[in-house]
Image: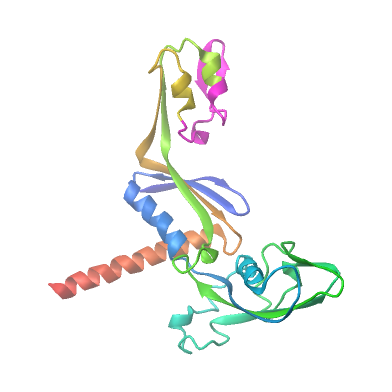
């Protein structure tokens, strides 16, 4: 198996996985979604809240506020020496105290750990009118997507590497225009592939091609384009590294159990 970097932005990583199979790439995708831990708010204790939002609605909104994650300094609560009682090694607090009239943003929360920050400070939490107050203490800790979607570190997806064949197309202009991601271009009266990796296998070009079968599109079963779009809780590289480590741990554990059963 070979990897080739295709595109890298601040929170988006796209790479080509060559000579692999759907089982592995889907295992990697599911591991990222379900098992890579991140920090999120789990509990909120409200002291004052006479805003337009009920405590439950605001607590749900707070849980979805992305926080930067430190996988070195923090333990999973169930694996911490405090046995999930709560300590500085497995949880932190975020506090807020404001009075209206004002707009309350995620950046108004103060973290007990300066290393854990709000990813998007300008996320609006609630608007307060004159005389309204909001005060709470929120507790955040590590968790995984298996527990709740708020812990999912990224949007992850893959597709088979596009394979396109062109043969005696009678309506080249329609084929070129049918593609929503500009995979094709006209070269005289011929259709030319100019952006193969952008193809997302929608088959629009196949549907409009005349005669039928003059454009054939399929996704490879051994080469895949894999994309990780991080919410900002963890860098894409760390998400991938952690996911691969977790897969290795599971394989080792499975192998150990098999050896014991023999």
Going by the image, does 102 lie left or right of 30? Answer: right
- Which is more toward the observer, 121 or 167? 121
Whether residue 63 is in magenta: the answer is no
Q: Vertically, is 213 above or below 50?
A: above
Between 195 and 200, the one lying in front of the other is 200
Query: What range is drawn magenta here?
Result: 177-202
Q: Is residue 4 visible?
A: no
Q: Answer with left or right where residue 58 lies relative to residue 100.
A: left
Q: Residue at x 45, y 28 (%)?
A: 203
Vertical placement of 2 versus 106: above or below?
above
What's the coloring here?
rainbow
Residue 150 or residue 169, whichever sits in front: 150
The foreground one among 35 and 99 is 99
Total count of labels: 0
Q: In the displayed structure, does residue 91 sit left or right of residue 58?
A: left
- Write down the quadrant of residue 245 in the picture: bottom left
The image shows residue 94 at horizontal and vertical percentages of 67, 78
Compared to 122, does 109 lie above or below?
below
Q: In which quarter of the image is residue 111?
A: bottom right
Q: Which residue is drawn at 24% across and 68% down?
A: 255
Q: Which quarter of the rendered picture does the C terminus lie within?
A: bottom left
The image shows residue 40 at horizontal and vertical percentages of 58, 71
- Is residue 196 magenta-colored? yes
Answer with left or right where residue 127 lies relative to residue 220. right
Residue 177 shows in the view: yes
Q: Identify the residue at image location x=84%, y=72%.
A: 100
């Amino acid at each position: 198996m070979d990897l080739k970097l295709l595109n890298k932005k601040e929170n988006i990583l796209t790479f080509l996985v060559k000579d692999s199979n759907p089982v592995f790439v889907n295992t990697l995708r599911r591991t990222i979604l379900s098992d890579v831990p991140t920090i999120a708010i789990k509990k909120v204790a409200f002291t004052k809240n006479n805003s337009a939002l009920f405590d439950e609605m605001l607590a749900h909104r707070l849980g979805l506020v992305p926080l930067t994650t430190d996988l070195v300094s923090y333990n999973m609560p169930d694996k911490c020496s405090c046995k999930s009682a709560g300590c500085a090694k497995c949880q932190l607090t975020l506090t807020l105290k404001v009075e209206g009239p004002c707009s309350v943003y995620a950046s108004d929360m103060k973290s007990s750990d300066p290393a854990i920050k709000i990813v998007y400070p300008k996320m609006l939490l609630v608007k307060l009118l004159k005389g309204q107050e909001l005060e709470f203490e929120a507790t955040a800790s590590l968790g995984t997507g298996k527990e709740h979607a708020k812990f999912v570190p990224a949007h992850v997806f893959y597709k088979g590497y596009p394979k396109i064949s062109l043969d005696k197309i009678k309506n080249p202009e329609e084929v070129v225009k049918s593609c929503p991601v500009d995979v094709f271009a006209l070269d005289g009266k011929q259709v030319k592939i100019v952006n193969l990796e952008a193809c997302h296998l929608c088959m629009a070009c196949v549907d409009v091609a005349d005669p039928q079968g003059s454009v054939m599109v399929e996704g490879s079963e051994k080469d895949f384009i894999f994309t990780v779009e991080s919410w900002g809780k963890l860098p894409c590289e760390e998400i991938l590294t952690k996911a691969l480590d977790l897969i290795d741990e599971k394989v080792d554990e499975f192998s150990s159990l098999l050896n014991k059963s023999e």
